[in-house]
Image (spheres, rainbow, N blue to C red):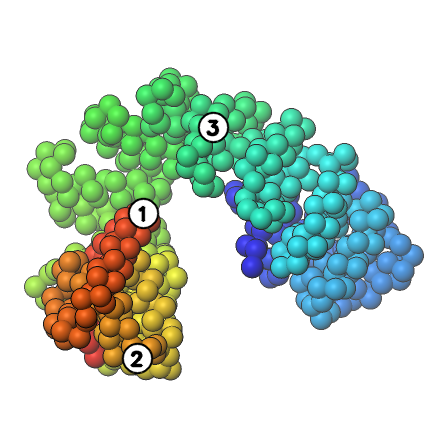
Amino acid sequence: MKPLISLLFLASLAPFATAQDLSMPADSPALSPDAQADKGSPAAGAIALFRQGRHQQALETARPLAEEGDPDALFLLAFASETGQGTDASRDNALQFYRLAAEKGHLEANYRRALILLNSEDAGDRDDARKALESAVEEDPANAGRMLGEAWLRGLLSDKPDRAKAIEWWTKSSEAGDTSSLILLARLHDGQFGFADQIDEKKAIDSYCQAADQGNVAAYLPLGSRLLNGSEEIRDEEEGRAWLDKAIDEGLTVAHLALGDFEENIREDIDAAIEDYSAGAEAGQPDCMLRLAAIRFSDRAGEPDPEKGREWLAKAAEAGNAEAHYQLAGLISREEEPDRLAMYGHLVGAARGGIAMAQNELGLLYLSGQLGGADAPAAAAWFTRAAKANHPAACYNLATLYERGIGVDANINNAGDLYSRALKQGHAGAATALARLYAAGIGTEADPVRGWALATLAVERGDDQAKQILGELSPTLTPELLTEAKKLLATMKGTAEAEGREEGDGDEDGEADEEGEGAE
């Protein structure tokens, strides 16, 4: 399946929403983006009703106008069908009404239709989207070109992502005055969309600079940050500071973080760094608070001041910083009499903030019964969230639950897949688990050769529990099978090295135990 197009690498770049955003507020689309003011449109009344949330009345008003071919009324019917507001959601109806509106010259209708088609699994639909967008380039090269660039980069119009096509279309779009495409070009050259072997810092800086010179505020921060903290070849302190100052004037308080990082890491002036971080912290920037906490826990600014460090962590957590929540949870867990309720609260804050380690540890906390009783389904839910981020211990823990049917329905296939994902990331326990499954033929045919290779790999990665499996399998292998097993082991190790996988954390409190009801 092709990946869904989001259209926005930067959330503020495009003037229209994505097709996948089906819960978009009714007042978010500019229902007539091409210079037609609402007051001048025959569908103005219907548009006003729709924006007020009176969807059915709006559609009743729009239908007779749509029958007469009014493009705004057609667009409104299409948008309602796409989002299911005031009528049943219908992809087919949305496409039909958008097509009719587009034929009447409604640009946004053409774009939204193209977005739906680009999200299709059918290559023919996506090619129709390409044609529609290319037809819009002559009239609106900025928006149509930007959309085409992303579609090519995401591999929606070809067998694989086409970087050259993305550059071609974003360049055309930027030449038409679209500074958002300049920022996308900068990020592409910066390696933010992959293609790490084709990073070109100078081209990235040039694109950011063009966008900033043309007044795109979104370029101020990345431009200033790179001019201060980038490689020596592109650094320009005076210009970098100037752009970051402009960013601060625009209310982008994270610019204080970039200034502080420059002082701390490049100039190695910790006092100046503290000054910049403090300015950001006073402006409510949580990452600056986190930096100040790290400094106070260390001896970089004199004697460590853990109390002050903890105060800054608390402020950062109050400001919604997930990492601060996670660090506070860790501090509490190491106290002689930890406040488990407070620790739980911070773990939840970190987990909700997307920190996979916190999600995994929260799962373990639910399994442990320390919250008043074990809650295996809740544990499975948090392990699942962490596993989606490919956290190796979470993959292993969730696999254990699936294998034993704890908190989830027993499913040996799911367990095997999750163990395999953890294995690819160097998790020793996952190698042992898979060795056990292959040795016993659980969920698969017995395969002592693969079991021996996996058990050996687990032992080499430090899991002594695999020694028992290895001891049971070794006598059963003939010299020929042993040779085959050693070759398989070499292949496994070579694949791991090629993929650049690191070993799992091996943290003893990071995995579910043998019964899936606690921590090792």
Residue 285: mark in rendering: none
- Figure disc tally: 3
> Which picture quadrant has residue 361?
bottom left
The amino acid on which the numbered mark 1 sits, given as a three-letter code, is Ala
* Left/right of residue 70 with respect to residue 135 in the rendered view: right
Amino acid type, label 2:
Ile
Residue at figure coordinates x 36%, y 39% from the top left: 283
* Gap between marks 1 and 2 measured at Cα: 29 Å
Residue 442 bears which disc, if any? Answer: 2
Q: Measure the C-alpha gap from mark 3 to mark 1.
A: 29 Å
Toward the viewer: 431 or 410?
Answer: 431
Number of the label disc, if any, that sits on residue 204: 3
Callout 1: few (<14), some (14-19), or many (20+) C-alpha neighbours within 10 Å? few
Q: Earlier in the sequence, mark 1 or mark 2?
A: 2
> Which quarter shows the N terminus?
bottom right
Mark 2 residue crowding within 10 angstroms, few (<14) / some (14–19) / many (20+): some
Q: Position of residue 64 (x, y in %)?
A: 89, 62
Residue 323 placement (x, y as % from top left): 29, 51
Residue displayed at 24% across by 30% down: 264
State the SS at label 2.
loop
Residue 239 at x, y percent in the picture: 41, 19
Residue positioned 33% across, 77% down in the render: 445
**Does the rendering let one see residue 131?**
yes
Front in this rendered view, residue 442 or 384: 442
Mark carried by residue 498: 1
Disc 3 element: helix
Name the amino acid, label 3: Ala
The answer to whether 124 is drawn above or below residue 373 in the figure is above
Report crowding for label 3: few under 14, some 14 to 19, many 20 or more residues within 10 A (C-alpha): many
Q: Is residue 481 left or right of residue 86?
A: left
Q: Residue sitting at 45 percent across and 41 percent down?
A: 194
Query: Which residue is situated farthest in the right direction here?
Result: 68
